[in-house]
């Protein structure tokens, strides 16, 4: 696992749920706490959803749900029962 990487590195990685093997897409954004600089969550695109102005709607995956970060993939552990809480609509500005 990386000890350091930049946001651009995360954006090039595909996110896969290890519970069901589903590919969730590549990271489109990250959310972080401006007070302590820690990443709160990663954001992946909703399936086939692009708004009128070309903005991509996304789902928020909490950092604590990330199992491993590899060279080209991020493995997340999102159980079927917790899916609704984890995947919250992220309004893009």
Image (cartoon, rainbow, N blue to C red):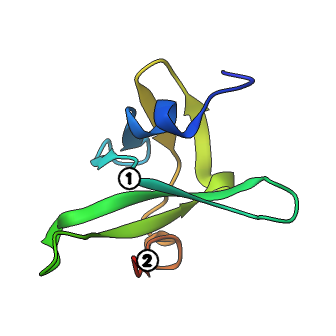
Q: Secondary structure at mark 1?
A: loop
83 sits left or right of 56 in the view: right
Of 83 and 34, the residue lying toward us: 34
Chain-order first, disc 2 or disc 1? 1
**Mark 1 neighbour density, 10 Å: few (under 14) some (14–19) many (20 or more):** many
The C terminus - image quarter:
bottom left
Write down the residue under mark 2.
90
- The residue lying at 55 percent from left, 40 percent from top is 7
Is 23 above or below relative to 3?
A: below
Task: Specify whether 92 is left or right of 1.
Answer: left
Quarter of image, res 55: bottom left
Q: Would you say 84 lies left or right of 33 here? A: left
Q: Position of residue 84 (x, y in %)?
A: 44, 78
Which residue carries the number 1 mark?
Answer: 28
Relative to residue 73, is residue 57 depicted above or below? Answer: below
Measured as percent of width and height from the top left, residue 14 is found at 35, 36
Q: Residue at x 51, y 22 (%)?
A: 70
């Amino acid at each position: 696992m990386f000890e350091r990487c930049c946001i651009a590195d995360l954006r090039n990685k595909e996110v896969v749920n290890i519970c069901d093997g589903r590919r969730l897409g590549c990271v489109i954004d990250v959310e972080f706490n401006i007070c302590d600089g820690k990443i709160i969550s990663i954001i992946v695109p909703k399936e086939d959803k692009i708004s009128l102005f070309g903005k991509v709607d996304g789902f928020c995956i909490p950092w604590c749900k990330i199992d491993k970060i590899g060279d080209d993939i991020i493995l997340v552990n999102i159980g079927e029962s917790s899916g609704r809480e984890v995947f919250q609509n992220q309004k893009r500005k």
